[in-house]
Image: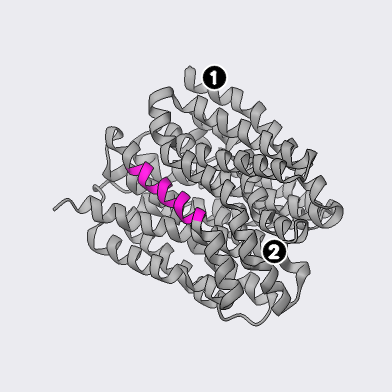
Amino acid sequence: MDTRRWALFGIVMITCLVAVEGTVVSTAMPRTVAELGGSEHIALVFSAYLGALAIMGPVWGNLADRLGARPVYILCVVIFLIGSTWASMVHSMQELVLARFVQGLGGGGLTPLGQTVLSLIYEKTERASAQAWQVGAFGLASLFGPPVGGWITQNLSWRWVFLLSLPFGGVGALLLFFFLRPPHLTPKKVPFDWLGLALFVSWMLVTLKATEAFHPPFVVAVVAVGGLLLLHSRRLDHPFLPLPLLRFPVFSAATMLAPLLGAGIFGGVSYFPLFLQEKLGLGDAGAGRAMLPMMLGWVACSSQSARLGLRFGYAPIVGLSALGLFVGFLSLSCSQHWAAVVVGQIGLGMAGGLSFTPLTLSVQEAVAREQLGQTTAAVVFLRTLGASLGTAVLGAILQGFGFVWMFRVGTLIGGLALLAYFPYRKALSG
């Protein structure tokens, strides 16, 4: 019996868990705020989750290279499910923010370790098919997440939205426990960079605080702690911050492109249900159904992105993603007519569906097998860092200036992603 198929099914279930959680929560948020109050904390519900994702991604990647991907992956699922259960029982928005942070602590390892495990158990010729299953599942779960979440919120309770993750995570964790058998790799026998980890976590926290409240002391703290982290990392051969990976041109180029794509895609998707409800007057279920063009575009593109990358090269596919991000936000910023809204949704869906798998595969193929965990985690971290910062910035623009200016800032992010694409294409062609 090929145990890899059952392991792949487990990874697919956990991928559905991540996708459902990412799309359903935004649909349920207006009803959640109406019951719990504390609308001023709505941006924190997203940024706390995404911030924890960003902080923990490199941590789990480092631990996976040292302890093995299988036990670390299962531990991440368990922590995520604990956070989901807590989120379903909260009594205030502040408590929901804490529960979402716990979800993010576990969720930080789910995407990078899932991609790492697939790269370990499948060879390059089989990897595209395995990745297609993963990203296709993500797309389908994202497609059905908003309407299902809207229906649950409207007919049952927003609390059941968080409990949706329990069956996916429980079945996925059991399958990984019994059937996942990645090849044995010699673990790193180098000291763990605890000081680097402490500096990194400190830098992430002050960076997130700076985006929440833009005050000069926070900006100075970001620069100071970031400088200390870079100076410390340059002194070590095996630092927590993976500076040695920058010698690979593809990875170096991805460090500019991945955060911009994450900021635009997740920043736009997080607040789009709110736009449909507040500006277009749709209810919970109606907003979920109205997001189908975005989710259909995401599904259609994600299911074929790996195969298209192998056939035409990774660079053109990632370039189409950046173009879709720019065009999508541009359409939304110029008009809020239904036609412009549909074009904007398709652009954002195309951006999300085409970018992540080809970008990750291109970087994985540029490094040694022993560095897959740290490399994959670094790419996902950069994307998640961009998502966290982008969500915080776009949320602040939304609260201060409204949806039109939020979409205009999104257009700027899309334009910067297009500019960052050209060094990436050059690195791949070289």
Look at the numbered disc 2 and give the secondary structure of its residue: helix
Tell me which residue sits at (53%, 42%) in the image: 297
Name the amino acid, label 2.
Leu
Q: Position of residue 188 (x, y in %)?
A: 35, 47
The tag on residue 318 is none
Residue 190 shows in the view: no
Report the coloring of the rendering: one colour
Q: CA distance from mark 1 to mark 2?
A: 38 Å
User: Toward which corner of the image does residue 361 lie, by quadrant?
Assistant: top left
**73 or 298, which lies in front?**
298
Q: Position of residue 337 (x, y in %)?
A: 76, 44
Name the amino acid, label 1.
Lys
Q: Which residue is mark 2?
A: 44
**171 or 77, which lies in front?**
171
Q: Earlier in the sequence, mark 1 or mark 2?
A: 2
- The stretch in magenta equals 130-143
Q: Which residue is mark 1?
A: 426
